[in-house]
Amino acid sequence: MRWKGLIPLVLTLGFLALGSVLFMDKWIESGIEKAGQSITGAKVEIDGFHLNLFKLTVQWDRLQAADARSTMRNLVETGRAAFRMSFPALLRRRVVIHEMTVADVRSGSPRKTDGALPQKEPKPTSGQPDFLDKVKAKIKSEIETMPVVRFDLGKLKRSFNADSLVAIAGLRLPGRLDSVRLDAAAAAADWDAFFKTFHPDDDLVKVRDEIKNVDPKQIKTVPELLSTLNTVQASWKTVKAISDTVSSRNQKFKQDYSRLSSYTGQLKTWVQDDYRGVLAKAQLPDLSVQQVGKMVFGPHLASQAETWIDRYQSLKKILPKKSDKPEKKKKEKRTRMRGQDIAFADRHGWPTFTVEKLSLSGQTGPTDSSAGFRLRGEVTDISSQPWITGRPVVVSLSGNKTDGRSVDVLAVLDHRTELASDSFTVKFANVSLNHIAVEKSAYLPSQIRKGSADFNCSAMVLENAVSVKFSSLARGLAFDFDSTAVTDTFVRILRDVISRLDEITLNAGMKGAGEDIHIRLDSNLDDKVGGELKRVGSQALTDAQNKITARLKNIENEKRAELAKVLEEKQKEFEQKLASCVKLSGEQKALVQEKLKLVQDEIDKRTNKEQDQLGKKARDLLDGVLKKK
Amino acid sequence: MFFINLFGKLIRILESGATPRRIAWAFALGTIPGWTPVACLHNGIVLILLCIFNIPFSAGIFGFAVAGLLALMLDPLFHSIGYAVLVQIPFLKPLWTWLYNVPLAPLLRLNNTVVMGSLIFSFILLFPTVFFFKGFVVRYRTHWRKHVDRLKIMKIIKGTGIVQWVQKLKGMEG
């Protein structure tokens, strides 16, 4: 034994341990900061980070993550946090934290230094917007296509020309119909080409001639019978190939014409889009659809929704995702094969990383003087592999203020299966609206003098579907408007209605999956302002709208007839041809099947007969031999 | 240059004062981290053994280099062996499950097919390697040394500073 040989090893390990003790805190701190920065897109700083390797405790005095949108403020800031890692779990390469406490969490706190990261070359994106990007685009387009109303009654009465308005509005319908025509023409060309090359009649007649006189009972010898069987089987192959082709083309024909027919159904929506466009161009309020609430509150709610979707997208980046495919590991320089990690049952049920309970306390406001809501609550079962723990992440926070305001937040982030589902419920009650300045808008008052409101929002987001409900009730309201004179009739009416209102309700919703997302926003302003506009705008407005509607109705009828002509042009011809093919191939298929069965039955019959005769002969021979003995 | 260095290292080991048995054991132990992926706990144990046993450490490094090079080609075989042992032998499954749950055992990474396969392979080859390499050292010292000395490559190797320094030390000892 050469115990001295251990000295270099011990010394090396000692130096490594010393280095770890001296620099590990910095390394880990820097690692966490970099990971955080890659998620938030702005600086993440940790102060006073310390890992105690002997006690396995981690603590920091302060963590601040800058807001990428406003880099002189923090998206989130925490005070002191401390937790202990489970030693038995660490021995099994798992980080398990039974309980963690983070105090003094706040959002929007001012920063002393700029939290912007150095500008980098933007990373090339995948090019494919995800579902939430589509939701944002839908919200944006919903707001952009909203008519901006400048309602001048005098001008409307003096000079309104529906024809010229329709001409300058740039209808989208003709372009859309051109696309339909192209699609229909491409489908027709495809079918023309198919029928030019597909002539099954000759083959089917040949088959029929070959087998119609086949009568297995008339065939004397077995070899002849087998030869007939081959002929019938060959015919069967031919008929089956033709029948399969006809069947698949028949299916395609149905798909093609179902797609082309669906355009007729969409025509009404397209005309409706153009109608809204023309109204926007004419700067007329649309009294037929109730969208006053959307015009008044829509832009503000859309901007809020976009902010929260952005935050949710950032959160999604760090949420685990279960997948059947093997996990992608970071590219590393390897010369050897990686092999496969076989998973065995883990009797402890520990995922790679888990925090069983995180107790949180903090405030929504940025500073002590404007603390906002004092919040308290917990987050349970944060895990890198929730499918192992079998429990979703549950965030439960509640807070209130001495003036009676309260807030409750419940979020369930369920990523246990491949179909992740995240649901959120937020309730604010008795929120004071006293002296609240309102976002600058032509329609809204400059500030709410007094009032209070309740807000409820619930949302559920699946991988490719969303359902959001938002409702608010503001009561005891009094408003202050700009003193500037208003010339626009619509704005004047709106202001009159709002100033008389004691209560404003707002109900918004968004539901949909994939590309099909529907957004609605209703308010009690809809009926009240709509009614008032109808009363004031009276006949002039209704006439103008009727003119536009009538003009568009003409265009719709004209285009509908054109579309029907395009679609029906060759449909009947192709249908007849296909039906004839289906009928002919079906008849021949039945005939060949029948003949095939007859030949096979005859072969079986004769085989059995031959077997019986052979058996009888064998028995006779055996009897003869036994008798001789 | 790498292979010249490797050859030079082999010659220096063979010409060192250690007994053939010790050289062979050091070489065989060194092949274990060579066959298996390096970042596994058992290689730490092998390192300690190489340090505490009175065997030439450089022979261990040589064994590591040789086995490490060969392992690049044999990884698919290791994967097959590991997969068969871990997955296709049902009665061993309770053993692997137990081992998977034992403290520190995950650091051995025995649930990885390449690690398991290469470790089995290295254990199977351990004693044959000792036997073969011991014979090789003896054969070199009794028969091949004079032929090898005449090779041109030896001039290159002996021309390097370290070899000259070793030779000088040997001369001082003599």
Image: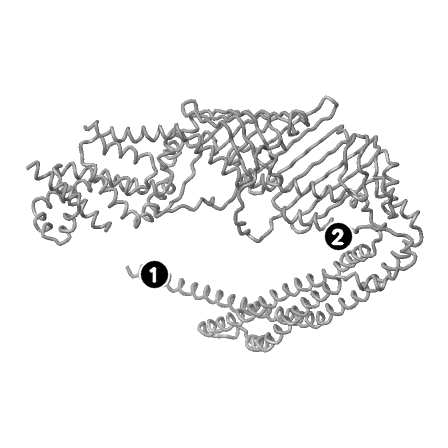
Say which amino acid is labelled 1: Leu
As measured in the structure, the alpha-carbon distance from the residue carrying label 1 to the one carrying label 2 is 100 Å
**In the image, B169: left or right of A367?**
left
Label annotation for residue A353: none
Q: Nearer the viewer, residue A524 or A268?
A: A524
Q: SS of the residue at dot 1?
A: helix
x and y percentages locating residue A364 in the rendered image: 65, 29
| Residue at numbered disc 2 | A145
Chain of the residue displaying label 1: A
- Looking at the picture, do discs 1 and 2 lie on one chain? yes
Q: Quadrant of residue A246?
A: bottom right
For label 1, the residue is A622
Question: Label 2 neighbourhood size at 10 Å, few (<14), some (14-19), many (20+)?
Answer: few
SS class of the residue under badge 2? Answer: loop
- A609 or A262: nearer the eye? A262
A459 or A581: nearer the viewer: A459
**Is A272 left, or right, of A23 in this rendering?**
right
Instruction: Give the quarter of the image for residue A496.
Output: top right
Mark 1 near mark 2, Cβ–Cβ under 8 Å?
no
Return the x and y of residue A234 as percentages of the image width and height.
51, 71
Q: Where is residue A55, by image quadrant?
A: top left
The disc labelled 2 sits on which kind of residue? Answer: Thr
Task: Report the quarter where the C terminus of chain A lies.
Answer: bottom left
